[in-house]
Amino acid sequence: MKRVKAKKYLGQHFLNDQHIAMQIVEALPIPPYKVLEIGPGMGVLTEHLSQKNEIDLSLVELDAESVAYLTTHYPQLSDKIIAADFLKMDLSLFFEGEFSIIGNFPYNISSQIFFKVLEHRDQVKSVTGMVQREVGRRLTSGPGNKEYGILSVFMQAWYNAEYLFTVDEHVFSPPPKVKSAVIRFTRNDVTDLGCDPGLFHKVVKTAFNQRRKTMRNSLKTFGISDDSEDVKALLQKRPEQLGVEEFVKLTNIVGASM
Ligand SMILES: C[S@@+](CC[C@H](N)C(=O)[O-])C[C@H]1O[C@@H](n2cnc3c(N)ncnc32)[C@H](O)[C@@H]1O
């Protein structure tokens, strides 16, 4: 069967390097044994995943041509190939209990994939895969880093983040314009952040939407009444200087002032 013709609008850049594919699959933390691969394309990761007998593998692929290719090459997986848009999939319908995600993700929707993971964090135990290098840095960097932002705080509130390695453009066909990164998130033990999660989201978003401002200025609209030394010190900082715990503290301060 012919190779799939790469479609730009689907973020298709096919990995040609078997060694890198194997490294990504080996980075997958198991258990859990249920694994969902997002965007298998022509199956460069699927090939290695399907050799792991302990894994119950499902694939979700939006491109009909790739689905046809996979069905021909992996007939044993044909009832595990979901021809769908991952972003629109009802995960609780497909998977009972916990599972892990793996993939060389379509770069045009990688942030949306991680926002969906956060929504389903009770089910998603880990995420291993490739994203644009800048996104990889952003998602895994900590406070004090210029790449640190909203999604870094949200992901790191619930997952341990690791930047595993950088991947060059030339191992893809067609090559993307930028380098890529393999990252891994493993859910931590936190079940309760220690503050209202909705308000936490609001505080983090408000802060990073005005990232040059101190917290005192960006959180003005919330009318913080606490003036203790502790709180003053927190409010003098800029969002990129604050870790998850400090955002939790701020959220509780905001909550108490409302
Ligand atoms: C960067 S390519 C990776 C392909 C293959 N895994 C590889 O490494 O060569 C991204 C893949 O995601 C698929 N894709 C794009 N948007 C998708 C979506 N919303 N849901 C599921 N798959 C999607 C593309 O068709 C493509 O096969």
Image (cartoon, rainbow, N blue to C red):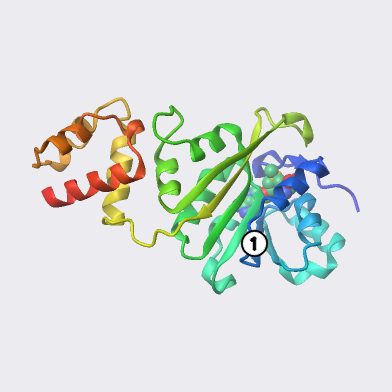
Residue at position x 33%, y 56% from top? 193
- x and y percentages locating residue 234 in the rendered image: 22, 35
- x and y percentages locating residue 2 in the rendered image: 89, 49
Residue at position x 44%, y 41% from top? 152
Q: Nearer the viewer, residue 123 or 86?
A: 123
Q: Which residue is mark 1?
A: 30
- Residue farthest to the right? 1
Q: Residue 150: which quarter of the image?
A: top left
Q: Is residue 149 visible?
A: yes
165 left or right of 251 in image: right
Q: Nearer the viewer, residue 11 or 167?
A: 167
- Asked if residue 204 is positioned above or below residue 68 in the image, the reply reads above
- Asked if residue 170 is positioned above or below residue 35 in the image, the reply reads above
- Residue farthest to the top? 212
- x and y percentages locating residue 43 in the rendered image: 78, 53
Residue at position x 83%, y 69% from top? 76
- Asked if residue 238 is positioned above or below residue 206 in the image, the reply reads above
For mark 1, give the secondary structure.
loop
- x and y percentages locating residue 108 in the rendered image: 58, 41
131 left or right of 47 in image: left
Q: Residue 221: which quarter of the image?
A: top left
Residue at position x 68%, y 52% from top? 39
Mark 1 is on which residue type? Ile
Q: Would you call the spot at circle 1 few (<14 residues within 10 Å), some (14-19), or many (20 or more)? A: some
Q: Nearer the viewer, residue 192 or 209?
A: 192
- Asked if residue 144 is positioned above or below residue 25 in the image, the reply reads above
